[in-house]
Image: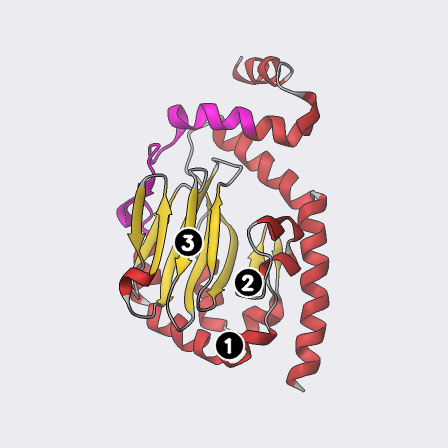
Amino acid sequence: MVFKTTIDRLEKLSPDQGILGRVVNYLEGLVPRYSKVGDAVFFSTDQFPWSHTLEANWQTIRRELDQVMPYAEALPNFQDISPRQGNIADDDRWKTYFFTAFGYRSQQNCDRCPETAKLLDQIPGLKVAFFSILAPGKHIPEHRGKHKGIIRYHLALKVPEPREGCRIRVADQVAYWEEGKSLIFDDTFPHEVWNDTDDYRVVLFLDIARPLRFPLSLINGIVFALIGLSPIVQVARGNHQSWEKQFEALLK
């Protein structure tokens, strides 16, 4: 009955969105009723117990990050991997170091950061994982995620002073990163980011499947499978593989 109702309502949505866009938009209205963690702007670490393990091991992750940072300028810009990010990242001040994204795994990056990779492998519902590296003076303008079936997670690894210079606004709430601490939020709320300092700000950036009750959990899983097969992800995968080859040549 639930699936029949879902299909009936999907047919009433704009056909211009495509089936994936229509499903995602429909899910947004259902999430508050089926979400196991509620429908909030920010979430607590107790709602995501695996976050305690990441916090307990943050210095291990930071040490592996420190081995990557000397090559920061050679790392790919976000929009170089995912061209759709060009509307919020059009310069060379938002660098990425990807581990995984919707079924694609950068084995070379994981091999360079083996302890981080092991910790990521233990996280249920992990869809995307990368070091998000913001250069001094970077501002990410207001934007919002498109899929409420995802929860956004940040583990602060490198936060320069002054504290007020590194901040994120989600909806009408402003938060500050603290090294070794988690920040968990719903990125479908409008949000923007500032690094008004003289050094890099780095977080371990994760997208996690929102814990949902059946049958929405099943529908959300189908959405993730479709995203993994979508041209957007396939283009990003090809771009990242091209960068990997260039980076390997640089390291030799």
Horizontal placement of 184 versus 64: left or right? left
Residue 21 horizontal/vertical position (percent): 62, 31
Kindly report which numbered mark, 3 or 1, lies closer to the viewer in this rendering: 3
Query: Could you say which quadrant of the image residue 155 lies in?
Result: bottom left
Give neighbour class at mark 1: few <14, some 14-19, many 20+ (Cα, 10 Å): some
Q: Quadrant of the C terminus?
A: bottom right
Horizontal placement of 19 versus 45: left or right? right
Kindly report which numbered mark, 1 or 2, lies closer to the viewer in this rendering: 1
Query: Could you say which quadrant of the image residue 182 lies in?
Result: bottom left
> What residue is shown at x 30% (from left), y 51% (from top)?
175
Query: Looking at the image, do the residues carrying marks 3 and 2 touch, with CB atoms under 8 Å apart?
Result: no
> What residue is shown at x 54% (from left), y 24% (from top)?
26
> Is 139 inside the magenta-drawn segment?
no
Q: Amino acid at mark 3?
A: Val
Of labels 1 and 2, earlier in sequence is 1
> Is 32 inside the magenta-drawn segment?
yes
SS class, disc 1: helix
Q: CA distance from mark 3 to mark 2?
A: 22 Å
The answer to which of 32 and 159 lies nearer the viewer is 159
Q: CA distance from mark 1 to mark 2?
A: 13 Å
Q: Amino acid at mark 1?
A: Val
Residue 221 horizontal/vertical position (percent): 55, 37
Residue 109 is marked as none
Give neighbour class at mark 2: few <14, some 14-19, many 20+ (Cα, 10 Å): many
SS class, disc 2: strand
Residue 193 is marked as 3
Which residue position is annotated with label 2?
99
Which residue position is annotated with label 1?
68
The answer to which of 9 and 139 lies nearer the viewer is 139
Query: Looking at the image, do the residues carrying marks 1 and 2 touch, with CB atoms under 8 Å apart?
Result: no
Q: CA distance from mark 3 to mark 1?
A: 23 Å
Q: Which residues are magenta?
A: 25-50
